[in-house]
Image (cartoon, rainbow, N blue to C red):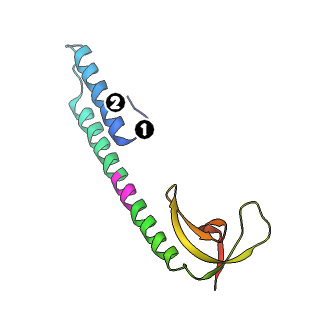
Amino acid sequence: MSVLPTGNAASIQTDFLNLLVAQLQNQNPLEPMDSSQMTTQLAQISELQELENLNSGFAKILASQQMSQAAAMVGKEVLFLPKGSEVALYGEVNSVDLLDNKVVLQVGQYKVPVESVQSIR
């Protein structure tokens, strides 16, 4: 039997344990469950949890690094393309914000994603 992950590791583990209990309660005594298969699946769930923890840690490190790099732009003039515009503008970076886990520069009246910066003066 294979189970496709649909949520985070904690909910997958909970689902797996609920399924395991149901299987144990309803198993045929003449054909008991394969314990090695259960152990393998439990090990895979543990690996999945650790990978999610690593990804979360890397995301935090990346956000911190991006925030530090963006903070160095405060007071500098940047060339950026405003959302919905075809004309690039220059403006001085006033501040740096974190919106929806993305680093955004405040340039005058514009909130500029770091990815939209084309050059720094």
In the displayed structure image, the side of residue 40 where residue 8 appears, left or right = right
Task: Please say if 33 is above or below 44.
Answer: above
Amino acid type at circle 1 is: Gly
Q: Which residues are magenta?
A: 53-58
Instruction: Pick whichever, 113 or 23, lies toward us.
Output: 113
Rendering coords of residue 39 (x, y %): 23, 37
> In front: 76, or 120?
76
Is 66 placed above or below 20 here?
Answer: below
> Where's the N terminus, which quadrant?
top left
Disc 1 element: loop
Q: Where on the picture, by quarter, is residue 16?
A: top left
Q: Quadrant of residue 6?
A: top left
Q: Is residue 24 left or right of residue 48?
A: left
Q: Do residues under tags 2 and 1 come within 8 Å of each other at their CB atoms?
A: yes
Residue 36 image offset from top left, x and y in percent: 23, 34
Badge number at residue 15: 2
Mark 1 crowdedness (10 Å alpha carbons): few <14, some 14-19, many ≥20: few
Counting from the top left corner in percent of width and height, residue 33 is at 24, 24
Residue where numbered disc 1 is placed: 7
Name which residue type carries label 2: Asp
Give the vertical position of 5 relative to 102 (above or below).
above
Q: Which residue is outermost to the bottom?
A: 121
Residue 3 vs residue 22: left or right? right
- In reply to whether residue 12 is colored magenta, the answer given is no
What is the number of the mark on residue 105?
Answer: none
